[in-house]
């Protein structure tokens, strides 16, 4: 603990900051009930499938939007085939006709919500656009048919027919992906799992949760919350993303520091291979050391060897004592010191440590109209969350930590949430950055794993490159780039580099690629920490994987999908 004469002024500053923050929250009248329900005016950027309500019980479907509404201005999204003219449609794939649609109807039945048909019927562009275009407005396909099965059996029959007839398939969940992996490139059939939304079972002793792949992440977490448990994954897109998509991309998110990755938490999977074979590995056992652990191939496989239809996952108890603090710091070095002290002093109750640079917070405030928690501006900010079982114990540990980091002038200023409303307000400053970054027209996103001491160097160098190129200005509307910001999961050494732009521009891409990937490779990092490869990073996998590893991956792809119908043009 620092000397008392150093700690007391720091704690007085914290107390004053807290009072100001509480007054701001009161004036704003924030009434969020979940971190996804952040109140800021980015309505035209809210992801297509809105927050689902809590499920009524086991075996019941969780409500979800049957069709994502078309994005405002979606007609202005350039087709992927036009943006990447070097990509050509694989001539081996069949072009859909009436007989194909009739066969799919015989599988899916008469439900009007099961098929969106632009092949034999005049489905409107608005009906199809939510499945063809990604939320970043960067990728857009030409799909004319969307299928929405409601059972694993239906998925099996669809895939078998597609495989037999060389029909390309684009598996799709909530379509919240960030690398173009969830939308078609050409005229692939979209298989969307939104109707597969049943929670199959939950054991409140072991914490084992079994659900369909189409269950919305927030619905799953709400269901578990009512029973005192928590889903071990949390994302900013949790009100839209589906569990199957989370599995397919091996989504990381905000809770990985505490609960680990899906590779460790998923106990079993049910999936369908391209030839219609159902992989029945929906184990509920934590220990099952009998042969190859084949389910791991589907976790992060991005729908390239099969479609995940259900999962079994171990869920921890929900912590009754949660604290959230938001700090301003003078440098990235100070942020590293704060993280080191947090691990040392908060240890088992530390559940999140997020870093945001000052530019990202200013961008969020500018896009949303929100007032930031601290009165003064700082070059860096950190958000810390603790989760434990004993309020008094956790508060004592947090107070000791605060006394130390402020007394030692590691942290310059900060606020601690006093109630749930303030918790949501602080988290909004972190989770709102992603959508705010593309508020002005578009965003180039890079999701990278970099050794912690060098993590922020990339952002500073990228900013310098754009300043020297003459492509960036905060005020000049003629410049393509508005700003370069960095934020991410410091606890996982995971940086999100966002280049906020007014429009997508090939000159901007030339500044970024392959330079970003070369920079990461030189420091033995990863070009994709949690977003996956999709279309955006397919050609760059060699910067993170050796030729031997890529060759092995291709062999797996060729073995399970010899005709190449699953999510073509992407991944490897």
Image (cartoon, grey):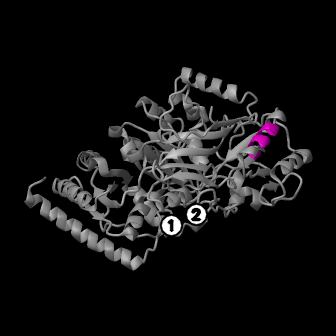
Total number of numbered discs in the rendering: 2
Instruction: Compare residues 213 and 430 and report the one nearer the observer.
Output: 213
Left/right placement of residue 528 relative to residue 155 reads: left
Residue at horizontal 45 percent and vertical 60 percent from the top: 363
Q: Residue 517 location, x and y as percent?
A: 50, 35
Secondary-structure class at tag 1: loop
Residue behind mark 1: 37
Residue 534 visible in the shown view: no
Distance from disc 1 to disc 2, alpha carbons, whole Å, reads: 8 Å
Q: Earlier in the sequence, mark 1 or mark 2?
A: 1
Residue behind mark 2: 51
Q: Residue 366 location, x and y as percent?
A: 46, 66
Kindly check if marks 1 and 2 are in contact, taking CB atoms under 8 A apart as contact. yes
Q: Which residues are magenta?
A: 154-162
Q: Categorize mark 2 by other alpha carbons within 10 Å: few (<14), some (14-19), many (20+).
A: many
Q: Residue 150 location, x and y as percent?
A: 72, 52
């Amino acid at each position: 603990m620092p000397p008392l004469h150093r700690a007391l002024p720091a704690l007085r500053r914290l107390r004053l900051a807290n009072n100001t923050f509480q007054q701001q929250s009161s004036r704003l009248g924030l009434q969020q009930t979940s971190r996804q329900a952040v109140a800021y005016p980015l309505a035209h950027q809210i992801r297509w499938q809105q927050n689902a309500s809590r499920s009524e019980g086991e075996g019941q479907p969780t409500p979800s939007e049957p069709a994502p509404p078309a994005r405002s201005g979606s007609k202005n999204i350039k087709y992927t085939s036009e943006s990447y003219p070097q990509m050509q449609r694989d001539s081996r794939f069949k072009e859909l006709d009436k007989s194909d649609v009739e066969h799919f109807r015989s599988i899916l039945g008469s439900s009007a919500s099961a098929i969106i048909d632009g092949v034999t019927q005049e489905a409107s562009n608005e009906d199809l656009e939510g499945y063809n275009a990604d939320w970043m407005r960067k990728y857009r396909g030409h799909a004319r048919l969307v299928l929405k099965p409601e059972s694993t059996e239906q998925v099996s029959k669809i895939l078998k027919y597609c495989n037999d007839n060389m029909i390309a398939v684009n598996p799709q969940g909530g379509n919240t992906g960030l690398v173009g992996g969830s939308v078609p490139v050409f005229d692939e059939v979209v298989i969307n799992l939104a109707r597969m939304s049943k929670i199959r079972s939950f054991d409140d002793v072991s914490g084992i949760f079994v659900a369909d792949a189409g269950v919305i992440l927030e619905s799953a977490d709400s269901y578990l919350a009512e029973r005192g448990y928590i889903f071990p994954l949390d994302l900013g897109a949790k009100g839209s993303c589906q569990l199957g998509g989370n599995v397919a991309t091996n989504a990381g998110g905000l809770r990985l520091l505490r609960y680990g990755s899906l590779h460790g938490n998923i106990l079993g999977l049910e999936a369908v291979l391209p030839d219609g074979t159902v992989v029945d590995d929906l184990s509920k056992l934590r220990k099952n050391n009998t042969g190859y652990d084949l389910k791991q191939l589907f976790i992060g496989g991005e729908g390239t060897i099969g479609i995940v239809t259900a999962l079994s996952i171990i869920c921890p108890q929900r912590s009754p004592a949660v604290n959230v603090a938001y700090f301003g710091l003078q440098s990235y070095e100070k942020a590293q010191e704060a993280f080191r002290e947090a691990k040392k002093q908060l240890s088992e109750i530390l559940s999140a440590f997020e870093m945001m640079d000052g530019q990202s917070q200013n961008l969020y405030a500018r896009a949303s109209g929100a007032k930031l928690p601290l009165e003064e501006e700082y070059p860096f900010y950190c958000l810390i969350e603790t989760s434990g079982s004993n309020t008094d114990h956790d508060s004592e540990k947090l107070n000791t930590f605060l006394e130390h980091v402020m007394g030692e002038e590691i942290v310059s200023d900060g606020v601690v949430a006093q109630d749930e409303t303030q918790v949501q307000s602080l988290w909004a400053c972190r989770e709102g950055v992603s959508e705010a970054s593309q508020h002005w027209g578009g965003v180039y996103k890079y999701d990278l794993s970099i050794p912690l001491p060098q993590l922020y160097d990339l952002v500073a160098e990228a900013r310098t490159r754009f300043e020297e190129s003459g492509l960036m200005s905060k005020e000049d509307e003629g410049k393509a780039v508005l700003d370069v910001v960095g934020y991410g999961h410091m606890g996982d050494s995971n940086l999100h580099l966002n280049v906020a732009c007014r429009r997508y521009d090939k000159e901007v891409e030339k500044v970024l690629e392959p330079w970003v990937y070369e920079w990461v490779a030189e420091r033995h990092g990863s070009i994709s920490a949690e977003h996956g490869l999709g279309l955006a990073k397919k050609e760059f996998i060699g910067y993170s994987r050796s030729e031997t590893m890529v060759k092995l991956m291709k062999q797996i792809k060729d073995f399970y999908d010899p005709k190449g119908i699953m999510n073509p043009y992407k991944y490897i």
